[in-house]
């Protein structure tokens, strides 16, 4: 059987390149500063006596299958424990949402995974009858699916404002890249770039992180994150698309996911 370069890319991405940030999902134009109003939101925070929601209350508010069409919504398989994530302290608020965790330690948190449903293409062709180019194309198309981890976390007092500010500060402080590790796995991120947010909630910060990939001719595995505050609840969205990483095609966090989740937090 032919061995496709695309298959090698798939293995590199899924197992090696973003082993820390992407393993959770695989297992089942911006300005210089992060676009958030965190400084304004933090004013008067000493008077904020908001009480955090419980895990049970968050589970009633998180995205479900009935809330969005075109996606399969279910539990997040696998996962990385907060204590297992190693990096410079200032960069950890970027990594936690990528692992289905709240950006900072919260009173309560829960998560879900939304996987894009893709209509099957024309009748499948036996791999042995495909050229390498055809095999690469078929493999890339099969992997071109948006996978989004949605995490809800809730905080007492001004904890939610501080959580968003921690992410905003990390985007600036870690813009030049950083190294993360979980156990024996290590992943280098070459840069972090501010992105335009969805405009939902009371304040938000959005960014793209470029992960370095081995044996992929200098290609970067780009993932997208947005953290949005709704009162004292924070919604974090982390999206990856393996096929578009391999083919160097742009993608974003699905608007339908953010819209559906935001509607449940009003």
Image (cartoon, rainbow, N blue to C red):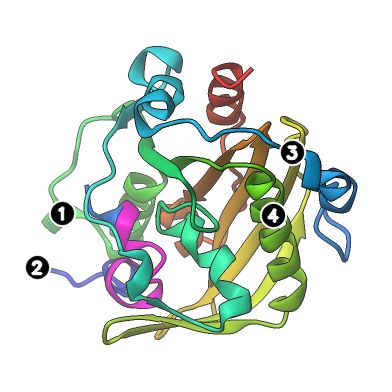
Residue 48 circle label: 3
Which residue has dot 1 on it?
A: 127
Are the two marked residues, 2 and 1, in contact with CB atoms closer than 8 angstroms? yes
- Above or below, 172 against 131 in this view is below
**Distance CA(mark 4)–CA(mark 1):** 52 Å
In-front residue for pair 35/115: 35
User: Which residue does the numbered mark 2 point to in the structure image?
Assistant: 1
Say which element carries label 4.
helix
The percent position of residue 161, horizontal first and vertical second, equals 71, 47
Residue drawn at (41%, 85%) of the image: 214
15 displayed left or right of 36: left
- The Cα atoms of the two marked residues, 3 and 2, are separated by 64 Å
First-in-chain label (3 vs 2): 2
Give the Cα distance between marks 4 and 3. 12 Å
Q: Say which of 254 and 235 sits in front.
A: 235
**Residue 93, located in which quarter of the rendered image?**
bottom right
Magenta region includes residue 109: no
Q: Quadrant of residue 132?
A: bottom left
Q: Quadrant of the C terminus?
A: top right
Image-based side of 184 in relation to 160, left or right: left
């Amino acid at each position: 059987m032919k061995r496709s370069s695309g298959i090698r890319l798939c293995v590199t991405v899924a197992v090696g390149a973003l082993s820390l940030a992407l393993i959770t999902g695989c297992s089942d134009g911006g300005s210089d500063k992060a676009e958030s109003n965190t400084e304004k939101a933090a004013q008067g925070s000493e008077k904020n006596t908001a009480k955090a929601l419980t895990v049970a209350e968050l589970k009633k508010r998180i995205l479900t299958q009935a809330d969005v069409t075109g996606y399969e919504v279910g539990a997040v398989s696998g996962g990385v424990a907060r204590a297992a994530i190693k990096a410079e302290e200032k960069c950890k608020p970027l990594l936690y949402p990528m692992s289905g965790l709240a950006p900072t330690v919260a009173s309560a948190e829960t998560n879900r995974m939304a996987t894009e449903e893709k209509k099957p293409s024309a009748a499948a062709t036996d791999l042995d009858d495909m050229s390498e180019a055809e095999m690469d194309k078929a493999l890339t198309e099969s992997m071109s699916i948006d996978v989004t981890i949605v995490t809800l976390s809730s905080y007492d007092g001004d904890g939610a404002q501080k959580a968003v500010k921690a992410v905003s500060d990390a985007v600036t402080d870690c813009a030049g890249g950083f190294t993360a590790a979980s156990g024996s796995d290590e992943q280098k991120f070459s840069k972090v770039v501010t992105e335009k947010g969805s405009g939902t909630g009371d304040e938000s910060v959005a960014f793209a992180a470029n992960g370095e990939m081995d044996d992929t001719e200098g290609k970067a595995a780009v993932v997208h994150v947005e953290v949005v505050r709704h009162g004292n609840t924070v919604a974090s969205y982390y999206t990856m698309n393996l096929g578009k990483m391999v083919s160097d095609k742009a993608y974003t966090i699905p608007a339908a996911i953010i819209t559906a989740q935001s509607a449940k937090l009003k």
